Amino acid sequence: MPRLFGTDGVRGIANSELTAQLAYKLGQAGACALTAQNKHTPKILVGMDTRISGHMLEAALVAGICSVGAEAVCLGVVPTPAVAYLTRYYKADAGVVISASHNPFEFNGIKFFDAQGCKLSDSMEDSIEEMINSDSCKDLILTGEKLGKKTIAQDPLRDYVSFLKGTIDCDLKGIKIAIDCAEGASYKAAPMALSELGADVFVIHNKPDGININRDCGSTHMSQLKSFVLECGADLGFAFDGDADRVLAVDENGNIVDGDQIMAIIGLALKQSRQLDKDTIVTTVMSNLGFDIMARENGLNLVKTKVGDRYVLEEMLDKGYVLGGEQSGHVIFIRHNTTGDGILTALQLLRVLKISGKKLSELASVMQILPQVLKNAKVMNENKHKFMEDELVAKLCDDLEAEFSGEGRVLIRPSGTEPLVRVMIEGKDIEYITKRAAELAAVIEERLG
């Protein structure tokens, strides 16, 4: 049986794979597993993005939470990082988000935060999954006055925006900002935070209708924001994803500034003000080689984890690092929040822009992005983790690494959901690395397909 939890909670097509019945069981099991040690009535926050299926799943999830005696506090439509922050701020026992992030509207997902606002460990997810598979929650279902209840939070968006504004020590007066809200969870919070800090804000894709979330907009479809920045003469632009836990930027010339560049800019500013612990940024194995080169040239250290912002956070908490994230725009500022936060990240970048007096293109030029080529090799599903056990594949990878001599690299990893091995090669010559990636993918297909 495949694992219920993926890299970021439980996801699937709403009412087909992610059913109301499953949401009910997740509410029960999540409430039981996350509040097992409580002596008081547990309180669990529930937030969601703008998908049409959110209301159905919220009702089922809340029913499951209440059935085992916990209180469900509904936040309505809020960004995922708002749930992480408000779980701590409201002193709740856990938080749940109903969202499928950057996926199309027909998908949805359910992910949990613990009382500290952190995503769950693999072992805790396994505990919840085991409770569902064994149907052990049926013995914990309550009746009568022991049932839990649903309440509505008074003004969670205001509490979250107030927190965001307090994370920077300057206003944004004189800065013209274009934003793409992806018809998602940032559609109220982002314009509110930026406007209240004094910025001149221009907004697109902030009219969600339940089925237009992420449709040709947001951080996975940047073309409209690039044009919009130029049309309105903005100093820069920001594109959020559906649940606003990540953001990508666009400079004044319409060029994309990705998560690696954003971390490079903010990391250097923190280092200069002696606020970057151990002069270290935590990133993943998918970060661009240009980030490594920039770090070496500027006295920064990069610590790399496997792909997934939860693993970045684990490393940060374990070693005491304060800044980390992913190329995709999940950036974590541990002094402020415990998960990737797109609006928070935008504010931290704007602070550097305001204090430095520089344009975003100038700030971003500190890092040269090397071309990356990604090729997929179709393999037998049972073989997708065995690529480095093949002597020829291992030798080809070693030879390429030696050939690049620090100015290129090879990264091979299995797909989490498909019978594929992903071959990524990075280097200065796009034609050459495209050719070599195709060759290596073909060998992997031949040997493991």
Image (tube, rainbow, N blue to C red):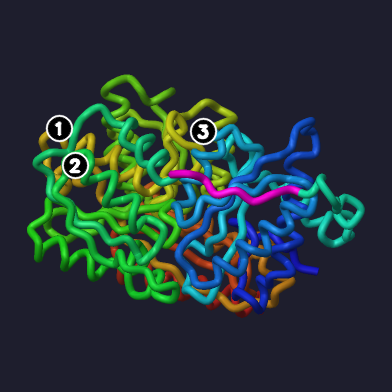
Residue at the disc numbered 2: 363
* Crowd tier of the residue under label 1, counting other residues whose Cα lies within 10 Å: few below 14, some 14–19, many 20 or above: few
- Sooner in the amino-acid sequence: mark 1 or mark 3: 3
Amino acid marked by disc 2: Leu
Task: Find the distance from the CA under tag 1 to the CA under tag 3.
Answer: 32 Å
Of tags 2 and 1, the one toward the viewer is 1
Residue at the disc numbered 1: 356
Outermost residue toward the front in this view: 145
Query: Residue 281: horizontal and vertical position, in percent?
Result: 42, 35
Q: Quadrant of the C terminus?
A: bottom right
Please name whichever residue, 318 or 298, is drawn nearer the observer in this view of the structure: 318
Q: Quadrant of the N terminus?
A: bottom right
Q: Is residue 272 left or right of residue 133?
A: left
**From the viewer's perspective, is residue 44 above or below residue 17?**
above
Q: Is residue 131 visible?
A: yes
The residue tagged with tag 1: helix, strand or loop?
helix
Amino acid marked by disc 3: Tyr
Q: Quadrant of residue 187?
A: bottom left
| Residue found at x 77% / y 33% | 38
Query: Residue 232: horizontal and vertical position, in percent?
Result: 9, 61
Query: In the rendered structure, which segment of residues is drawn in magenta?
Result: 148-155
Residue 320 among those drawn in magenta: no
Do the numbered discs 2 and 1 sit on residues whose CB atoms are within 8 Å? yes
Q: Is residue 123 visible?
A: no
Of tags 1 and 3, the one toward the viewer is 3
Query: Residue 59: horizontal and vertical position, in percent?
Result: 64, 63
| Residue found at x 29% / y 31% | 168
Please name whichever residue, 181 or 145, is drawn nearer the observer in this view of the structure: 145
Residue at the disc numbered 3: 89
Magenta span dominant secondary structure: loop
